[in-house]
Image (cartoon, rainbow, N blue to C red):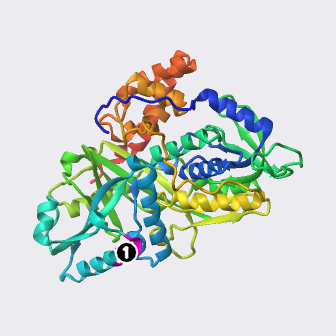
Amino acid sequence: MLEAARIDYLPEVSFSADTRQADLDAMESRGVDLLVVGGGITGAGIVRDAALRGIQVGLVERGDFASGTSSRSSKLIHGGVRYLQQGDIGLVLEAAAERRTLCRIAPHLAVAARMAMPVHGRTSAGLMKFRAGLWAFEKMARIGGEERHEVLKADEVESRIPGLATDRLQGAVVFTEYVTDDARLTLETIKSARRAGAAIASYAPAVAIGEAPARATSSAAGASSGGGLRVRVRDELDGREREIVARVVVNAAGPWVDAVRGLSGATAKRMHLTKGIHLVLARELLPVDDIVVMQARDRRPVFVVPWHDIVWIGTTDTNYPEAVERPEITREDVDYLLEATNRAFPRARLTGDQAQGAWAGVRPLLHQEGKSPSEISRRDEIIVEPSGLVSIAGGKLTTYRKMSERVVDAVVERLGSRVKPCSTAELPLVEPGEAVPIVRTQLGEGDVEHALQNECALTVADVLERRTRASLFARDNGVAAAAHVAEVMGRRLGWSDERRSREVEDYRRRLARDFAWRERGAAR
């Protein structure tokens, strides 16, 4: 929770700097049946599924787990209603089914919240249109009970959503969505994979992919292991390069999918990258109890999401030229969100100076010629290169598990092996007693030790940005805790005083980049 909380951790399988080193050694010396490149939510889902099926699998990630897109989403598990407008019934049904699955396997990471969609206009036609759409969605997606939608009259909306603009307000439809901690979901999926036997290493980017010479290797899947691909990986902790031989390599690098494809000789670009930003404000500035859908000046939906003592506002959807971990937040981005919010809540009069947190991420979409960012389908696609590299592109956070299942099905076919059936929809994501509360911002020494020993945190930013969400949601963005975190980590990892200072300074610089737009003038 956002308040300080004592957490009594049960023993877990060790997952630390030491296990990372051992896993890299093992992958280099023995090879694997499957190597996954990319430790975001998609790669995490794939490696968990493969490990649970008994495949000898490893994963390497260029930075920290979820350090890119998978910690920078809107943190909503959409049931699929938003895809009705695109006419993508298959995606609607899959998203709804996968949301139910996540609620079953990780209920602590799927928190129900009501979403209100106010409707303004000269007549109530728009309200009836949304009502009809939700009725159809609930029938298709088998939504029942308290999750079913309700329709509010204008006066009921005014009472329920204080401060909302009332000009031509016809009413609102209210339905259920779910809030998650995207980074925590990714991390728990990675941890589950390691408990199932996967070898996993962060800060180990793939730097070259080529054909591997035929050789005999042991195979957990039970088939001969000749050929495959050879992946050169650089250990960012010591600078050493290693070679890992894998019978199949899956590229799950998100925004970096094309870059990894290029390592195997592919030249045609398949990805279309777009940027989404979010702002965090104190909830007292916008005291809403429901997620509220607003409309930006270009008619795109923008959300305000309440969570304990804060709200976040998002998101934008603009073309972005390159794959980066932290895309630039511009004054124009901030103005876009604030204009939509201040128009929906005219008494709020929000300014950029009031933002206490901000984040931006890059969406890895499949390019569709002639379509704007918001029109591009969120479907996924499996791409097989002439080299044999298997890439997974596109997709949504909500459907990550099913997307991973399809990828592993394809891997099993290529391996030609008998393995266990997929079990990721039934097995709980965490062991009893291990569930960490969603979104923590305050840290005791035990929490830092746990992040080091059981969650493979290797930098101060790993702890404050993703093991907790202090960088986003704490009042001071975790600045006051940084030195303490560095001290605890330094003792455990053998850091010098200079390294500890550098870690704290690096964390401060990362935060400064997220707020650099303020230097170019306060957003209106």
Can you say which quadrant of the picture contains the C terminus?
bottom left
Circle 1 Cα neighbour tier, 10 Å, few/some/many (<14 / 14–19 / ≥20): many
- The spot of residue 150 in percent (x, y) is 22, 70
- The spot of residue 416 in percent (x, y) is 78, 59
- The spot of residue 135 in percent (x, y) is 31, 77
Query: Residue at position x 28%, y 68% from top?
Result: 148
Query: Residue at position x 33%, y 28% from top?
Result: 6
Residue corresponding to mark 1: 137
Say left or right for 170 vs 182.
left
Q: Magenta stretch containing residue 398, yes or no?
A: no
Can you say which quadrant of the picture contains the N terminus?
top left
Q: Quadrant of residue 123?
A: bottom left
Q: Quadrant of residue 305?
A: bottom left
Q: Is residue 264 above or below residue 90?
A: above
SS type, badge 1: helix
Q: Magenta stretch containing residue 138, yes or no?
A: yes
Q: Quadrant of residue 334?
A: bottom left
What secondary structure predominates along the stretch shown in magenta?
Answer: helix
Which stretch did the figure color magenta? 136-142
Say left or right for 156 vs 461.
left
Residue 269 visible within the image:
no
Query: Residue at position x 45%, y 65% from top?
Result: 97
Query: Residue at position x 55%, y 43% from top?
Result: 192
Of the pair 258 and 398, the residue shown nearer to us: 398
- The spot of residue 301 in percent (x, y) is 34, 66
**How many discs appear?**
1
Residue 344 visible within the image:
yes
Say left or right for 391 vs 111.
right
Of the pair 228 and 521, the residue shown nearer to us: 228
Q: Is residue 515 above or below residue 422?
A: above
What amino acid type is highlighted by mark number 1? Phe
